[in-house]
Image (cartoon, rainbow, N blue to C red):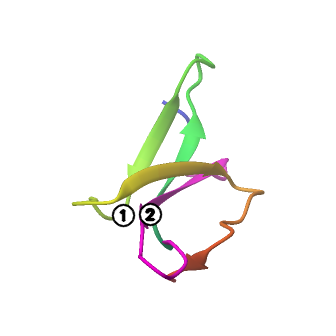
Amino acid sequence: MADQKNTPPTHRLFVVKERKGAKDFWTPVGEAWPHKSGTGFNIKLDALPTDGELVMLDKSQEPETETQH
């Protein structure tokens, strides 16, 4: 497993809920680190999504819609 205490995450996880007539609503729910094998990710969730779509973005990317902090 990646050493999450010493390495910053490379990706962020969001739950995206579509809203009619408004921008999609993005809620940050976790972070991800590349797995040491290089073929996957270790994921830490701060919340479990119950609906919506789970999206993982490179940490350098920002959602282009409303974000809840």
Alpha carbon separation for disc pair 1 and 2: 15 Å
User: Where's residue 21, x and y in %?
Assistant: 48, 81
Residue 36 is inside the magenta segment = no
| Residue at the limit of the structure toward the front, as seen here | 21
> Helix or strand or loop: what does disc 1 sit on?
loop
User: Where's residue 15, x and y in %?
Assistant: 41, 61
**Residue at point 25%, 60% (across, down):** 51
Q: Is residue 63 visible?
A: yes
Give above or below for 15 relative to 32. Answer: below
Instruction: Return the residue nearer the eye: 62 or 31.
Output: 62
Instruction: Return the residue nearer the eye: 27 or 19.
Output: 19
In which image quadrant can residue 36 be found?
A: top right
Mark identifier at residue 25: none
Decide: few, some or many residues near mark 2? Use Cα within 10 Å; few <14, some 14-19, many ≥20.
Answer: many
Name which residue type carries label 2. Answer: Val
**Residue at point 31%, 64% (across, down):** 47
In which image quadrant can residue 61 be found?
A: bottom right
| Residue at the limit of the structure toward the right, as seen here | 60
Q: Between disc 1 and disc 2, whose residue precedes? A: 2
Give the number of callouts: 2
Residue 12 is inside the magenta segment = yes
User: Where's residue 32, x and y in %?
Assistant: 54, 46
Residues at discs 1 and 2 in contact (Cβ within 8 Å): no
Is 18 on the left or on the right of 24, as rendered?
left
Mark identifier at residue 16: 2
Q: Is residue 4 visible?
A: no
Name which residue type carries label 1. Answer: Asp
Give the residues in magenta: 3-24
**Residue at point 55%, 34% (across, down):** 2
Residue wearing tag 1: 46
**Residue at point 52%, 32% (across, down):** 41
